[in-house]
Image (cartoon, rainbow, N blue to C red):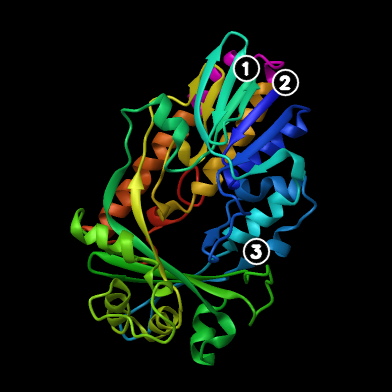
């Protein structure tokens, strides 16, 4: 059976590898002309997200992740307001991507071509690309992210919904932080909750994949409200604009990064130093996407092409991997009957996606719009299948 996977990020790579392992003729098409890169944004490790690497990639969790042994909430003065032991692990997007990418043969991974349309009939799917190539396959997997072309073609009535806030993100070298700050943030996941906002930090591998203490990065995520319209558009335009400034030029006072750094000075000391030490923070608008279907004959949607869940459960990467694993299992069980296997697979993944989106919507709205939460609230813990699950 021939398979086209559209989208070469984590969801597409996982699906491509699993379907290849079934003996299928798989090609993954990535619209970017170069290997994907990341500024090192962190990912909380759920077992599903690293399952392929551990079971079939020859890697152990300790090789690709860092660990936190404490969950801390800091008060405004930097004191510990709450503490409990934890066993969370963390990695970086770039670490996962490189680890998965090296396991897929180069001839199966096509760069620089984006799907523009497709048509299916009883014999299969004809997929058209920007390069004018047309590829025939028996299964089309759309793993092309939040701005999915596949979703747009299949479900034009489905649109992403802006949540009313953004996540400012960034990383700083662990070894460049003062020793007193390292003592707080290096082996812990650290929170600070404030009115209509919260921030968290945790250690992740360095850009080169190193997990050695002192060489790692400290990742921060700071959720801040931003009204739809002009406020949000300015953030979208200028979220990366530190790179657009001439070398050595000051960032203008009205610039979003200036406002971010001014606000950071009111954070507890270790968190303020983490944010202020980050050279290139970037902004991620928070959205929800919910689809009524994931299977369409010989075509399916997986990962963020189907459901986009706010990051509060740290489950987006795990959900994409779960979509891919269950898809491969359904195809194997059905003996290659694509349409029937997709119909059986769809029910469980729709239920999982809907439950996840509903849970993180409630968590985000409670955090950002007046509800708040108490330190250590178990309902706010990470998990794909529920808090701590």
Q: Nearer the viewer, mark 2 or mark 1?
A: 2
Residue 175 location (% of width, % of height): 59, 85
**Residue with the mark numbered 3:** 65
In the rendered structure, are the residues bearing label 1 and label 3 in contact, judged by CB atoms less than 8 Å apart? no
The stretch in magenta equals 332-348
Residue at which label 1 appears: 338
The local secondary structure at tag 2 comes to loop
Residue sitting at 55 percent across and 87 percent down?
176
The residue where tag 2 is placed is 1
Q: Can see residue 374? A: no
**Is 222 on the left or on the right of 140, as rendered?**
left
Image location (x, y in percent) of residue 117: 49, 27
Q: Secondary structure at mark 1?
A: helix
- Magenta span dominant secondary structure: helix
The quadrant holding residue 73 is: bottom left
Residue at the image point whose x is 73% and y is 38% from the top: 108
How far is mark 2 from mark 1, CA to CA?
Answer: 10 Å
Say whether disc 1 or disc 3 marks the residue closer to the N-terminus: 3
Query: Magenta span has 339?
Result: yes
């Amino acid at each position: 059976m021939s398979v086209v996977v559209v989208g070469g990020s984590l969801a597409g790579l996982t699906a491509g590898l699993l379907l290849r392992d079934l003996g299928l003729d798989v090609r993954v098409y990535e619209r970017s002309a170069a290997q994907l890169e990341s500024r090192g944004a962190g990912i909380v490790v759920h077992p599903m997200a690293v399952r392929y690497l551990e079971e079939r990639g020859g890697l152990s969790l300790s090789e690709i992740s860092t660990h936190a042994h404490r969950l801390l909430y800091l008060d405004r003065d930097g004191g510990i307001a709450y503490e409990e032991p934890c066993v969370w692990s963390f990695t970086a997007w770039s670490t996962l991507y490189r680890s998965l990418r090296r396991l897929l043969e180069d001839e199966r991974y096509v760069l620089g071509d984006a799907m523009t349309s497709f048509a299916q009939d009883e014999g299969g799917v004809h997929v058209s690309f920007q390069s004018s190539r047309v590829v025939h396959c028996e299964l089309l997997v759309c793993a092309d992210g939040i701005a999915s072309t596949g979703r747009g073609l299949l479900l034009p009535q489905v649109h992403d919904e802006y949540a009313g806030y953004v996540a400012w993100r960034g990383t700083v070298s662990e070894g460049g932080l003062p020793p007193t700050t390292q003592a707080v943030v290096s082996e812990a996941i650290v929170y600070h909750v404030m009115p209509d906002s919260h921030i968290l930090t945790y250690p992740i591998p360095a850009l080169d994949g190193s997990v050695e203490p002192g060489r790692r990065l400290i990742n921060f995520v700071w959720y801040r409200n931003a009204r739809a319209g002009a406020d949000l558009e300015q953030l979208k335009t200028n979220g990366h604009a530190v790179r657009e400034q001439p070398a050595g030029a000051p960032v203008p006072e009205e610039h979003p990064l200036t406002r971010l750094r001014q606000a950071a000075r009111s954070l507890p000391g270790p968190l303020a130093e983490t944010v202020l030490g980050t050279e290139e923070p970037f902004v991620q608008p928070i959205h929800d996407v919910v689809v009524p279907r994931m299977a369409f004959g010989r075509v399916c949607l997986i990962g963020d092409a189907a459901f986009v869940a706010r990051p509060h459960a740290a489950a987006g990467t795990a959900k994409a991997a779960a979509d891919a694993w269950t898809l491969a299992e359904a195809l194997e069980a059905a003996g290659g009957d694509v349409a029937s296997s997709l119909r059986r697979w769809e029910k469980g993944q729709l239920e999982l996606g809907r439950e996840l989106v509903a849970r993180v919507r409630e968590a985000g709205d409670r955090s950002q719009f007046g509800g708040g939460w108490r330190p250590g609230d178990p309902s706010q813990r990470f998990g794909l299948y529920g808090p701590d699950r």
